[in-house]
């Protein structure tokens, strides 16, 4: 499950980076009129706002999945039983 989430995070990161780069106003020529300038900026801002909301939704999904993974019960493996007087973490044996 953790590996699947790592793959999904990577795919999402590539997607959101490409989406944001696409939304950036990288025009080489100067707008001739105020209306043209406003239209370019308005389009770029709407795409950037969409990218921000997609990122917020992804963070909310990851938070919910993380909490679900932490709080699910019943599938925990019991650890090895400790002997009487044995410390909880033993040092590795020396060769």
Image: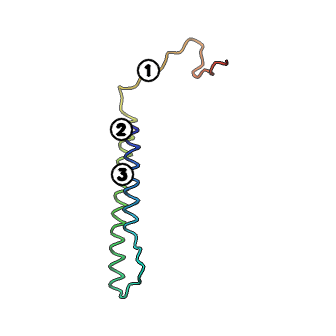
Could you tell me which quadrant the C terminus lies in?
top right
Give the residue displayed 34% in from the left and 53% down from the top.
Answer: 57
Q: Of helix, strand and loop, which one carries label 1?
A: loop
Tell me which residue sits at (40%, 77%) in the image.
27
CB under 8 Å between discs 2 and 3: no
Q: Residue 58 carries which label?
A: 3
Asked if the residues shown at circle 1 and circle 3 are in contact, with their CB atoms under 8 angstroms apart, the answer is no
- Of badges 2 and 3, the one in the foreground is 3
Nearer to the camera, 23 or 56:
23
Residue 62, given in percent of the width and then of the height, sits at: 38, 46
Q: Residue at x 36, y 26 (%)?
A: 75
Identify residue for label 1.
Answer: 78
Looking at the rendered image, the quarter that the N terminus falls into is top left
25 above or below 64? below
Q: Where is residue 55 in the image (x, y as percent from the top left)?
A: 37, 56
Mark pair 1, 2: CA separation:
20 Å
Graded by Cα atoms within 10 Å as few (under 14), some (14 to 19) or many (20 or more), the crowding at tag 1 reads: few
Nearer to the camera, 35 or 18: 18
Could you tell me which secondary element the residue under label 3 belongs to? helix
Determine which of the numbered discs, if any, sits on residue 41 in the image: none
* Residue 20, above or below 69: below
In the picture, measured across the screen, residue 87 lies left or right of residue 49, that is: right
Please name the residue that numbered disc 2 is placed on: 68
Counting other residues with Cα less than 10 Å from the Cα at mark 2, is it few (<14), some (14-19), or many (20 or more)?
A: few
Specify which label sits upstream in the sequence, 1 or 2.
2
Gap between marks 2 and 3, in whole Å?
15 Å
């Amino acid at each position: 499950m953790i590996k699947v989430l790592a793959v999904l995070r990577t795919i999402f990161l590539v997607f959101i980076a490409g989406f944001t780069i696409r939304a950036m106003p990288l025009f080489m020529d100067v707008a001739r009129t105020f209306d043209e300038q406003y239209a370019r900026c308005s389009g770029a801002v709407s795409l950037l706002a969409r990218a921000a909301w997609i990122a917020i939704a992804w963070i909310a999904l990851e938070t919910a999945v993380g909490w679900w993974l932490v709080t699910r019960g019943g599938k925990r493996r019991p650890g090895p039983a400790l002997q009487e007087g044995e410390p909880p973490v033993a040092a590795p044996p020396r060769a």
